[in-house]
Amino acid sequence: MEIGYVVANLAPEMNVRLTRSGNITLRHRTNAPVQFVFYRKPDGLYLRRRIDTNDPFGVGHNMNNDKPFLTIVDAVAYFKKYMAKYPKNVVTRFAPSR
């Protein structure tokens, strides 16, 4: 099961949930306003970073240059590298300017 793999590799840092439509959502344990979602499409898995707003569709973008991941293992490995490289982006709406 994909959700089991995600939980085993990203908990307790991230809260993992399965939506009614079968997508896997991730949110930092501090209930940050940033949400990451794994979407299943015919050509693979996509990872999207969403910002909570009053808009029901949110504001966000597809990660990995909008390229699909073939397996959940690849997607989780990418996300773990992203978390290590950009820890502030996991919990804040926008990265502070440097």
Image (cartoon, rainbow, N blue to C red):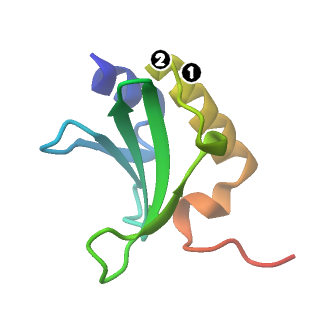
Where does residue 33 sit, x and y in percent of width and height?
A: 42, 71
Q: In this view, does 51 lie to the left or right of 98?
A: left
Q: Residue at x 44, y 62 (%)?
A: 50
| Disc 1, SS | helix
Q: Quadrant of residue 57?
A: bottom left
Where does residue 45 sit, x and y in percent of width and height?
A: 44, 30
Name, please, the residue furthest toward the bottom: 54
Image mark for residue 74: 1
**Closer-to-camera residue (78/14):** 78
Reply above or below: 47 against 57. Answer: above
Where's the C terminus, which quadrant?
bottom right
Assess disc 2: are there few (<14), some (14-19) or many (≥20) residues with their C-alpha within 10 Å of its C-alpha: few
Where's the N terminus, which quadrant?
top left
Q: In which quarter of the image is residue 67?
A: top right
Given the image, on which type of amino acid does mark 2 rest? Thr
Name, please, the residue furthest toward the right: 98
Q: Which residue is drawn at 27% across and 39% down?
A: 23
Name, please, the residue furthest toward the left: 20
Where does residue 58 sit, x and y in percent of width and height?
A: 37, 70
Reply above or below: 29 against 41. Answer: below
Given the image, on which type of amino acid does mark 1 rest? Asp
**Closer-to-camera residue (52/44):** 44
Assess disc 1: are there few (<14), some (14-19) or many (≥20) residues with their C-alpha within 10 Å of its C-alpha: few
Q: In this view, does 67 lie to the left or right of 1?
A: right
Q: Are marks 1 and 2 in contact (CB under 8 Å)?
A: yes
Image mark for residue 71: 2
Q: Which residue is drawn at 30% across and 83% down?
A: 54
Reply above or below: 63 against 94. Answer: above
